[in-house]
Amino acid sequence: MNKKNEIKGLTLTELENYFSSIGEKRFRASQVFNWLYNNLVTSFEDMGTIPKKLRRKLEKDFTVKTLTLKTVQSSTQSRTKKYLFSTKDNYSIETVLIPDSQRNTLCISTQVGCPLDCKFCATGIMGFKRNLTLSEIVDQYLLVASEVGKNVITNIVFMGMGEPLINFQNTLDAVGVFTGRHANRISRRRITVSTSGIPEKIIALADSPYRVKLALSLHSAFDDVRSKIMPINIKYPLNDVIEAIRYYGRITDTRVMFEYVMLKGVNDRDEDVKAITKLCRSLPSKINIIPFNSIAHMVQDGVSKELEPTSASDIKAFVQKLSDNNIVVVVRSTQGDDIAAACGQLATDELRVDN
Ligand code: SF4
């Protein structure tokens, strides 16, 4: 191997195979994983149990760090923190830590930008550059954990920039790292993958060893409205997505969380209450109501420019109607909107940053 590879891009088995291939004992892979994911070291030099000569060899063959922390912004309204990282090829990505009374949730990104162009989402407006590598996904967790303390992060949501199920294998392998014995062993029930709805990937996730929680960006229970605000719905209509979700629920014994951003006059009508009620009654689910953060300032025209937030009083009335219909509904607080870290606001000013 003469090209420097990302060591965190390897699974444990792949690293064991590497050690075998250079005539070393396979257990060295476990030791290295322990240093990386348990002790959070960022150089081979600090891996005390690895013989010096082998450390030199690892240094020659692999890189350890893939991201550089550029800035940390702290919300003045909540304890939310937004981390801006740069990649080796100078793209910017964002990661958000959202503490509340019961948990500390890390919202991580899986892509630089996003190709899906949801009309209410700042990331979609940025366009798409590339998938993040496994190493870059995992490094978001490791670098934040180094800053705030190893055991502080209790939950992980794949809800940052990008559609995780397009970057499927890297997302899956990252879940493998987070739930594995070398990291903090975050329970699969504390990890949520959020998708805009790609049926074959939802089914593949259900059939994988990682039965994490699933969230679906629903945002309308009507195909015509959903297609207008989420173009992916034209390719994968809601019925097909819901069938995949039903399968996921059956196989994993979890209930889906429907994400629902409140858009004035678009999806906050009485007919929407009726349609959501019918949908939620048909499968184990709950719905997460999200106040909309306008992104009209980011675009010249088009659907995104027209979208407005539903007022707080109308959200309250909408939630009450759903509750009256015995639907399990939670309202997400707009944590971090003062630092553009709230849902749908993640977008770096420039895709590339100067180092
Ligand atoms: S909501 Fe998610 S899937 Fe849609 S554009 Fe934004 S990041 Fe992509």
Image (tube, helix red, strand yellow):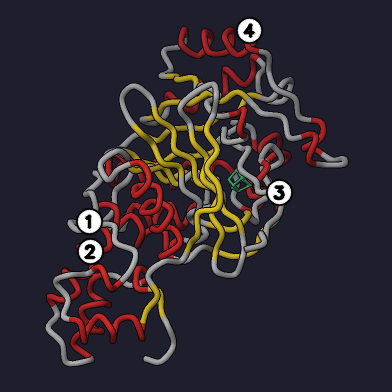
- Quadrant of the rendered image containing residue 351: bottom right
What amino acid is at disc 3? Asp
Do the CB atoms of the residues marked 2 and 1 lie less than 8 Å apart? yes
What amino acid is at disc 4? Ser
Q: Where is residue 207 in the image (x, y as percent from the top left)?
A: 31, 57
User: In the drawing, does residue 244 fall left or right of residue 82?
Assistant: left
For residue 35, the mark is: 2
**Which residue is identified by label 1?**
38
Do the CB atoms of the residues marked 4 and 1 lie less than 8 Å apart? no
**Which residue is identified by label 3?**
349
What amino acid is at disc 2? Trp
Q: Which of marks 4 and 2 is in front?
A: 2
User: In the drawing, does residue 203 fall left or right of residue 190?
Assistant: right
Task: Tell me if the residue at label 3 has its CB under 8 Å from ligand 1.
Answer: no
Q: Where is residue 224 in the image (x, y as percent from the top left)?
A: 71, 37
**How far apart in space, not on screen, are marks 2 and 1 (Cα)?**
6 Å
Q: Where is residue 135 in the image (x, y as percent from the top left)?
A: 41, 65
Q: Nearer the viewer, mark 3 or mark 4?
A: 3
Q: Quadrant of the C terminus?
A: bottom right
**How far apart in space, not on screen, are marks 4 and 1 (Cα)?**
46 Å
Q: Quadrant of the N terminus?
A: bottom left
| Towards the viewer: 237 or 142 | 142
Do the CB atoms of the residues marked 1 and 3 lie less than 8 Å apart? no
Q: How crowded is mark 1: few (under 14 residues within 10 Å), some or many (20 or more)?
A: some
Q: Of label 3 and label 2, which has the lower sequence position?
A: 2
**Which residue is identified by label 4?**
313
- Point 47% across, 43% down: residue: 194
